[in-house]
Image (cartoon, rainbow, N blue to C red):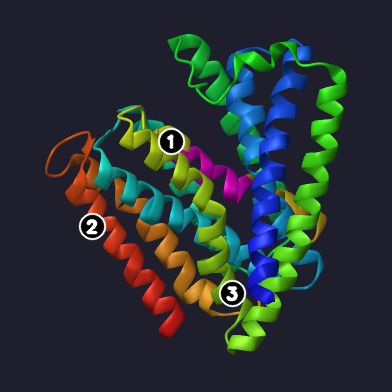
Amino acid sequence: MDIVYILIGLTLLVVGGEFLVRSSVALSFKMNISRMVIGLTVVSFATSAPELLVSLQAALDGFSDISLGNIMGSNIANIGLVLGITAMISPITVDRDFYKFNWPVMMAFSFALYFFLLNGEDIDRLEGGALVLGLILYLLFLIIRSRKVKEEVVEEVDESLKGTSWFKIIIWLIIGGAALYGGSELLVNGSVALARDLGVSERVISVTMIAIGTSVPELAASVIAALKKEKALSFGNLIGSNIFNIASVLGITSLIQPIVMQSQQVLSNDIYWMIAFSFILVPLAFLPKKFLFGRIKGLVILAGYSVFLYMTIFK
């Protein structure tokens, strides 16, 4: 039954996340917020809601390693699994903005997380506030910069939601909120029970199974787009997702409930893998063919992800 609870929980999170994104975008249009700002802020926050609910629920229930494992595992899966498989199907063009701006910010947040955990083995409210403040500054810089260069990366903003009625928005918000809450409850409880049944830590389940589960929707959308020869995956969106996972999810969670690290392997294993997967993107973007992420590079990081799963589960 534990597996069933986990699958139902993941399904509810996907459904809840979708309703929350749609209602948030429709509400933003009602408030006359520009399409660019909606894409850079509202959509990003809404798509991070499933991870936020899972991490917050786990922290409140006393399973902080699920909070940390969920985020670190998701960041690793975004690169090793989603980018790896998508690049193997269809080569991805790397924009210069990736290594000049987005990648350094992602690395900065990754190292900040490492030093916060190293200093006291927790993320307290002050450190959580620093992460959230860093995210706000990042978003403000993104908005100012986008207005200057006239580049609006807002593919995820659905213009058809402009005419959505208030009744629909409220119903979508209620459905989204209820599904996210119920999904996070089932996922956390199912994961803890499964970990105990298998004799492994909650950390192992969260950094592998939960992380893969929360990455499946993005993976499916990217694979379908790649097969159709459409724009498969944006490096900017991928990096942005990883930044939001650390800054908004862990930041907001620790402001509400400080996250205390329970397993030393979070600091001695998981975070090193997360930093390594993040770091390797720049060398791969330049070698051997500049600004193109093709099948061989995709195979390399997918193989790396397989090694990570093996080491985490069996070692």
* Residue at the spot of label 3: 203
| Amino acid beneath label 2 | Val
Was residue 186 drawn as part of the magenta stretch in this picture? no
| Quarter where residue 70 is shown | bottom right
In terms of sequence position, does the residue under pointer 2 or pointer 1 come before the other?
A: 1
Residue topped by disc 2? 300
Q: Residue at x 63, y 30 (%)?
A: 43
* 291 lies left or right of 101: left
Is 8 left, or right, of 100 in this rendering?
Answer: right
Residue in the picture at 59% in, 24% down: 39
The range drawn in magenta is: 238-247
Disc number placed over residue 102 in the picture, else none: 1
> Residue reaching furthest bottom?
199
Q: Residue furthest left?
A: 288
Sequence order check, earlier mark of 3 and 2: 3
Secondary element at tag 2? helix
- Element type at marker 1? helix
- Residue 182 on image: x %, y %: 80, 56
Magenta: main secondary structure: helix
Question: Where is residue 51 drawn, in percent x and y?
Answer: 65, 52
Q: Which is more N-terminal, label 3 or label 1?
A: 1
The answer to whether 123 appears left or right of 285 in the picture is right
